[in-house]
Image (spheres, helix red, strand yellow):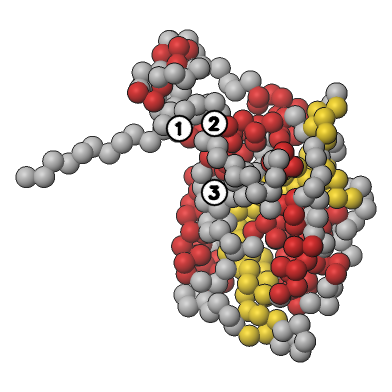
Amino acid sequence: MLAVRPSAVVPDSLSVPSNAPEHCPGTESELAGKADACNGCANQEICASNTPKGPDPALPLIRDRMATVKHKILVLSGKGGVGKSTFTAQLGWAFAADDQIQTGVMDVDICGPSIPTIFGVALEQVHSSSSGWSPVYVQDNLGIMSVGFMLPSSRDAVMWRGPKKNGLIAQFLKDVDWGDLDYLVIDTPPGTSDEHLSVVQYLKESGIDGAVLVTTPQEVSLQDVRREIDFCRKVGIRVLGLVENMSGFVCPGCKTESQIFKPTTGGAERLAKETGIQLLGKVPLDPRIGKSADYGVSFLDEYPDSPASDAYLDIIDKIKNILGNETTP
């Protein structure tokens, strides 16, 4: 007869403090302060007591800082390498193309911070003042923040456990002097882990306008996007829509398009129909997108005649409309 081990109780991830150890059972658990994972934790004594647990002290500071940010957008992908950060950058460039729109891009892909390179400011450093950390400005109305600015070298690996990652995300939200922003675009790592949960927890009071999910046509990518959709629904984040990246290949010479990654199971279009989520658009492959990212320039400005630029701008206009703003002419 086989012995069946009872399923482990999964802690509410939003009840886990930002400085908790890796296997924290959560402050609401009966094992709070008593589990083996609690040994050595700074919160062990208060968790084990009967004292009511107070809210995270960072939350009111984040709420005050985010009060001047009109729209907060998450860019998510279940799978790595689908062009999520590149899309985030083009979204930032497009918003900031209007001089009257103040835009911020926050990179919480802590182990793979590529946003500084894509924006061409990888050698810049973060400066602090009496009002907090200053974002690195790509142009007057486009500021970005990333752990990439804090590393001694671009070759240095970031080997942090969850609590340290969570702490840095809290600092990005409460200590960065973002000022008055129309849009804050948050670039996240692949998956549904610490960074995503931290952003949701810290912005719970301030509110997140929604998430854009980036995928490629293959089923192997779509499988992970389905998990990302499930994550959004479980934590209460509205999905603004799906973007299918690398959807066909555009020849820079003749401008003809051919399929490289065939949507064997229907691609993002079929997934959108199955889930009832809007398909914002399909962005074809263009080798100059990667070139623009490597050189830190706006693909939309450099190659406005590319079909990929048309696709990006159409998607971005749809996002603006969903959020209730007029599209930029």
Name which residue type carries label 1.
Glu
Mark positioned earlier in the residue sequence (3 or 2): 2
Q: Which mark is residue 22?
A: 1
What residue sits right under mark 3 in the picture?
Answer: 232
Q: CA distance from mark 1 to mark 3?
A: 23 Å
Height in image: 290 above or below 172? below
Write the residue at 85% across / 38% down.
180
Quarter of the image with the N terminus in it? top left
Height in image: 120 above or below 60? below
Write the residue at 58% across / 80% down.
260
Q: Give the x, y percent position of residue 220.
A: 47, 67
Q: Give the x, y percent position of residue 163.
A: 54, 31
10 Å crowding of disc 3: few (<14), some (14-19), many (20+): some
Q: Give the x, y percent position of residue 257.
A: 68, 85
Q: Nearer the viewer, residue 247 or 266?
A: 247
Q: Nearer the viewer, residue 159 or 250?
A: 159
10 Å crowding of disc 2: few (<14), some (14-19), many (20+): some
Write the residue at 65% across / 36% down.
169
Q: Nearer the viewer, mark 3 or mark 2?
A: 2
Write the residue at 79% across / 62% down.
295
Q: CA distance from mark 3 to mark 2?
A: 22 Å
Secondary structure under the numbered disc 2 in the rendered image = helix
Name which residue type carries label 3.
Cys
Q: CA distance from mark 2 to mark 1?
A: 7 Å
Mark positioned earlier in the residue sequence (1 or 3): 1
- Whether residues under marks 2 and 1 lie with C-beta atoms below 8 angstroms apart, the answer is yes
Name which residue type carries label 2.
Pro
Q: Nearer the viewer, residue 185 or 111?
A: 111
Q: Which mark is residue 163?
A: 2
